[in-house]
Image (spheres, grey):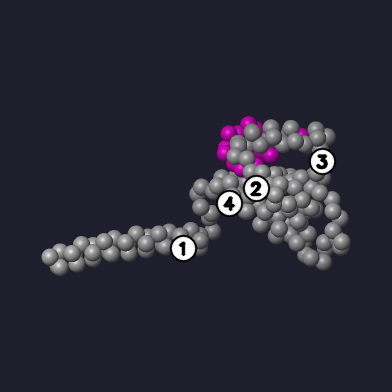
Amino acid sequence: MKRARFAQLSAVALALVLVLSAGVYGITRGLLADNPPPSWGRLEIINLVLNHIRADPCNHPDASTVKATRTTRTGAADILAKRWDPNEWSGSPDGGSPDNTPLWLVEVQGEIPVVGGTRGVKECEEPPSGVKSLVFYIVTVDGKISTGFGKRAP
């Protein structure tokens, strides 16, 4: 009886070790890979964009204003066309060709003088200008930031 119980517990322990090892291997592989996970959710996309903006020490995004919308390239072009003054915006982020490729459109407000690129701390305005910006970023569903658009906040 004791041998049967021992064999049962050994089988369960071995299965548990295999499952946990596979999970740790998958997580470690994902963390070490250059590619992000295949399916990013709204919070991961928001954090990705906020970290991208904050990479420039002159940028101060207001995290409470962030909105991430799952849409397509054509949908993003429509949203941007509605939100931008026609004198400031024309065209579409995909060069004008209709496209149903899924993506995230992330909207952020704050003091964001630099869209894309980074500067050093010495290049920032002291004191900060206080001019608020409205910035949109297009992010692929696999978490790659492809384009940023910015203007003064209304």
As helix, strand or loop, the secondary structure at mark 1 comes to helix
Q: Main secondary structure of the magenta part?
A: loop
Q: Whole-percent x and y of residue 115?
A: 75, 51
Within-10-Å neighbours for mark 1: few <14, some 14–19, many 20+: few
143 or 9, nearer to the observer:
9
Q: Nearer the viewer, mark 1 or mark 3?
A: 3
In the depicted structure, whether residue 75 falls above or below residue 124: above
Q: Are marks 4 and 1 in contact (CB under 8 Å)?
A: no
As helix, strand or loop, the secondary structure at mark 4 comes to helix
Picture quarter with the N terminus: bottom left
How far apart, in angstroms, are the residues tagged by discs 2 and 3? 24 Å
Residue hosting label 1: 28
How far apart, in angstroms, are the residues tagged by discs 4 and 3? 27 Å
Mark seen at residue 129: none
Residue hosting label 2: 146
Residue hosting label 4: 44
Q: Residue at x 60, y 34 (%)?
A: 99
User: Which amino acid, mark 4?
Assistant: Glu
User: Which amino acid, mark 3?
Assistant: Pro
Disc 2 or 4, which lies upstream in sequence?
Answer: 4
Q: Are marks 2 and 4 in contact (CB under 8 Å)?
A: no
Where are the magenta residues, as a range? Answer: 90-106
Disc 4 or 1, which lies upstream in sequence?
Answer: 1
Q: Nearer the viewer, mark 4 or mark 1?
A: 4
How far apart, in angstroms, are the residues tagged by discs 4 and 1? 18 Å
Disc 2 or 3, which lies upstream in sequence?
Answer: 2
